[in-house]
Amino acid sequence: MVGTGEEGQRLVRKHEQRLFGGVHEGAGVESGPAAFRIRLVREDVRDRKDYTAGRDNPLKYLGFGFSSTREELARLGIAPGSRFTLEIVSSERTRDILMLVNYVWVNCGGLGARWRHGWGCLAWNDATLNPAPQAGFLLGQRREELARLLGVDPGGAHFDQAHPPEFPVIAKNWFRVKLCSGFMSWEQAMEAVRNQLHVDSNPPRECLGAAGYGYRQGDGESHEWVVERTSRGNFPYYPSRDKRAAIEALEARSGSASSPAYEFKNALFGLPIQYRVGGRPVTITPYSGRDELRRPCPISFRIFEHQKGFYVATVYTKSRFLPEGAKLAGVRGRGDRVFVRYPDTWDYLDRFFQSCDGNEVEF
C-alpha cells in the first residue's frame, strides 16, 4: 500500500508503532504504549507430543531441529484442535485493524518454529471470521479495508519491476498463492509438502505436483537421481542438487570474493544451510562484514482444513534476499571461508512454484 522505499518504510514503522507500541522516535514516529490490551481467557490444549519421532517419519524433514538428540529432549508440538480464547480491549478502529492484520497472518503465515514448512497453522474459532483465500478478492478486499482504516491510498505503492521490494508485500507480481486440495489429513498434506522439497523414494506416495517433486535434489523434471549412501554405507539417499558444488567448495582454497565459482541454488530456500561431504561439513552462510546473517525462504506452506479434507496453500513472496553488500560464503570449519554464489534471478523458485499443482489465487 505504501511501497518499501524510504518513505514507505517510515510509514510502516509509524503505523506499526501506533498499533503495537514502541520507543523509537523521530521522522514523525512517536513513542508510546500499544493501542490495545490482550489477555488469555481460556485454553483447551490437547496433549503435546513429538511429531517428528521415528527414523522414517516424513515430518522429520519439515521439523528439522524438533527431534530429541543426545544433548536435548524433543521439542513438543501443540496438538491439532487445541483452542485459545483471547480477550482484546481496544477502540473499535483498533479492533478492526487487528482483525484485518490477523486475517492475513492466519491465512498467509503461522506461529512458532518452522512455520514456513507448514507447522503452526492457525484459524479463528469462528469460521465466518476466517474465510480461506480461495479467491483473490478476499485478500484484495482486506487490503483495501486496511488502507482505508490507515488513511493511505491502496493503489499508491509502485514497485520497480526490475528490483524486488525491500520486504514481503501483498502486491501483484511480488506475491503469489496456489491452492492444492485432495488431502484427507493434515499429516498427508504435510507429507506432500515434504516430498515436493525432498524425497526418500521415487516416486513418492504423496506430493504437491508430479512435475517437480524432490525439487531440492533433482532438476525438478527428470527425477533421474543416482542413489548414494552415507559415509558408513548403511543409509541410501538421493543427494542434493548442490552436492557437486559442496564438494568443490570443500576442496577449494580460500580465495577472492570478486568471482566466486560455486553456485548453490538451494540457498534460495533459506540460509544458513549445511552440506556434508565425506563426513565433513560445509555450511553456506551469508555475511554482512563479519556478521553472520539468516535468511528465510521466500516460499512457505499453509495447511487448511476445508469441509471434510485438507489443502495446502503455497505462498510465494518475492523481496530482497540479501542486504546490500552482503556476500555468501561456504564455511569449512574454524572460520575458513570460500565465497560462493546463488542464483541472481527468481527463475529457480518460479519453476518450483509452477511445479506445484493447484489453482493460483488471482488478485
Image: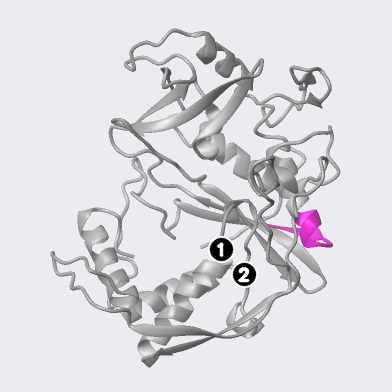
The segment highlighted magenta reads 179-189
**Front one among 139 and 88:** 88
Asked whether residue 223 is drawn in magenta, I would say no
Q: In this view, does 145 lie to the left or right of 108?
A: left
The secondary structure type at the circle numbered 2 is loop
Q: Which of disc 2 and disc 1 is earlier in sequence?
A: 1
356 vs 35: above or below: above
Numbered badge on residue 111: 1
Query: In percent of the image, x 61 and y 15: which residue is there?
Result: 244
Few, some or many residues within 10 Å of mark 1 (<14, 14–19, 20+): some
The type of colouring in the image is one colour
228 horizontally vs 76: left or right: right
What is the C-alpha distance between the residues marked 1 and 2? 7 Å
Position in image of residue 17 (x %, y %):
28, 71
Residue plotted at (51% across, 36% down) = 268
Residue 60, compared with residue 140, is above or below; it is: above
Q: Label 2, on which residue?
A: 122
Q: Is the C-beta separation of discs 1 and 2 under 8 Å?
A: yes
